[in-house]
Amino acid sequence: MNRLESYLAELEDRLSLVSSGIRRDIIAEARDHLVESAVAQGGGPRGMERAIRDFGSASEVAARYREVYEPGAIHFLAFCSLAAALAALSHPFLGPASAGTFALVALALVYTSLLAGKRVGTAAAIAAVVARFGVHGLLYLRYADFVDHGALQLAAFLASTLLLIPLGFIPGRLKERTFGGIDQ
Amino acid sequence: MGRDEWSREMKKGSVQLCILSLLAEGRKYGFQIIKELKDRSGNYLVLKEGTLYPALHRMEKRGLIVSEWTVEEDKPRRYYAITPAGEAALAQGRREWQRMVSSVRSVMGAGE
């Protein structure tokens, strides 16, 4: 692999969290720039080395792109907090309405994944799982007799909770593979 | 505060304005923008080249410019053009720049 290809491969690796369509455009644009810049700097391996030096390190350039294309910390926190709050209220111990709330959590995660991308969707799902397990732990400590309904119920609770992870990941991933569009 | 630091701080606010000014003359691609910024500023506005493109993408997300891929000599090339919102921002930016230059000149002149 020559210097240009290895540089572009590193840049692409560092942009793995940006959606594939945008990533392809970034790499194509960087390639066009580096080829023209290398020619302007005398051509050959030395010209390419200078062009890459002037362009900046892959980590530095990727960091600038991530500032543009990845959701900011506030959005990230908002999605995760909403998912965690809804998930906490969806614990089966909290009454019959909890089933409806659980469905709402599932829908919220699918929506988040489609809207904000698989990375944010998965993070929100993990926040939801942690919240459900956290509530379960707290309730168990306080009301062990009520919460403990046996292995079957516990297994159902664990399975339904862990199901939230693919709900946060898969829709965003499918969208990315299908459209290759904006990931946020 | 050294020369580099002053230079960096002053360029920060002016590069976007200069990019919009260049694009107001007609569509351009990244390398062309970098070269014109450098040549027309007498080698003052020399950017770390890889940072121009994220800046262009950010401006596009804000609706100030729009990009279009074309094929030239069998190679894809992305051109950027100013939008009506970009032209309005440029007009506002130019006015603000004039105000700032004149205000700073008045203050600095008063201290001389």
Image: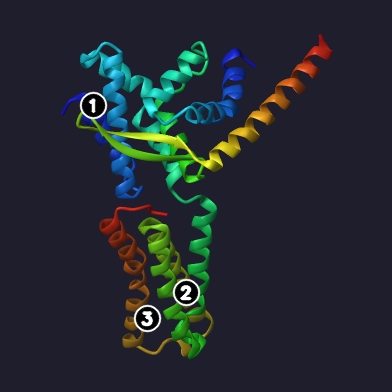
Q: Residue at x 19, y 31 (%)?
A: B74
Q: CA distance from mark 1 to mark 3?
A: 51 Å
Seen in the image, is A85 located left or right of residue B1? left
Residue at which label 3 appears: A157
Tag 2 subunit = A
Q: Is residue B10 visible?
A: yes
Q: CA distance from mark 1 to mark 2?
A: 47 Å
User: Could you tell which of marks 1 and 3 lies nearer the N-terminus?
Assistant: 1
User: Could you tell me which chain the residue with mark 1 belongs to?
Assistant: A
Q: Quadrant of residue B33?
A: top left
Please tell me which residue is depicted at 41% across the width and 31% down the height of the picture. Answer: A60
Respond whether the residues carrying marks 1 and 3 are from the same subunit. Answer: yes
Can you identify the residue that label 1 sits on?
A4
Give residue A56's position: percent from left, percent from top: 38, 25
Q: Are marks 1 and 2 on the same chain?
A: yes
Quadrant of the snapshot with the N terminus of chain A: top left
**B64 horizontally vs A9: left or right:** right
Look at label 1 and name its amino acid.
Answer: Leu
Three-letter amino acid code of the residue under disc 3? Phe
The numbered mark 3 sits on a residue in which chain? A
Q: Which residue is mark 2?
A: A87
Q: Is residue A151 above or below residue B8?
A: below
